[in-house]
Amino acid sequence: MQNPPPGQQSYGNSSGNPQPSNSPLGSMDPNVAAALSYIWIVGVIFFIIEKENKFVRFHALQSIMFGVANTVILIVLAIIAMVLTIVFSIGAAAAATGGGDGIATVVGLLVWLIWLIFWLIGLAMFAGLIYAAIKAYQGQKFKLPIIGNMAEKMVNK
């Protein structure tokens, strides 16, 4: 391998991660590969093909685990939101027929609030994914809460 230009450290020396030598990723910078891993299916592919670079494997596995958790959480929240929408809509219709227009309005706003919370949680999860990808691109081993420690233990086995 060539030495880096004066004043610059090589990738392996600056962050402690392995050099991208004869990796299945070819000449792709490990920081780029780690950041791209946060595109869920790319993370699966990188985790399968990359066997030596623990930095890339960590971010790929963290992305996979985050994607699974995100999917499960959003499905559960969507089911809860749909059930509450149905229940509150029936309640609002019953209240409206009984002359309780004010109650029907409050229930309608509550249904809207439930769906707003659902979308805000999804947006927060997406923002977390973008933040983790940026940190990976910067060469940092950023760990997401709970998932990061699990991914690190699995990669270091």
Image (cartoon, helix red, strand yellow):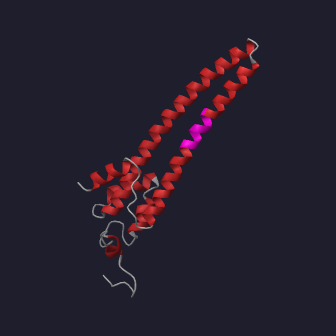
Instruction: Establish if 22 lies above or below 147.
Output: below
Residue 53, percent across and down? 30, 64
Q: Write the residue at 39% across / 55% down.
A: 143
Instruction: Establish if 74 lies above or below 37.
Output: above
Residue 51's quadrant in the figure? bottom left
In the picture, measured across the screen, residue 13 lies left or right of residue 76, that is: left
Residue 49's quadrant in the figure? bottom left
Q: Write the residue at 41% across / 52% down.
A: 144
Quadrant containing the N terminus in the rendered view: bottom left
Residue 73, percent across and down? 47, 38
Q: Write the residue at 28% across / 52% down.
A: 153
Asked if the stretch drawn in magenta spans residue 147, the answer is no
Residue 50's quadrant in the figure? bottom left
Residue 30, percent across and down? 38, 67
Q: Give 55 or 33, whichever is nearer the viewer.
A: 55
Residue 68, percent across and down? 42, 43
Asked if the stretch drawn in magenta spans residue 115, the answer is yes
Residues shaded magenta: 114-121
Q: Write the residue at 61% across / 23% down.
A: 86
Q: Residue furthest top?
A: 98
Q: Residue furthest left?
A: 157
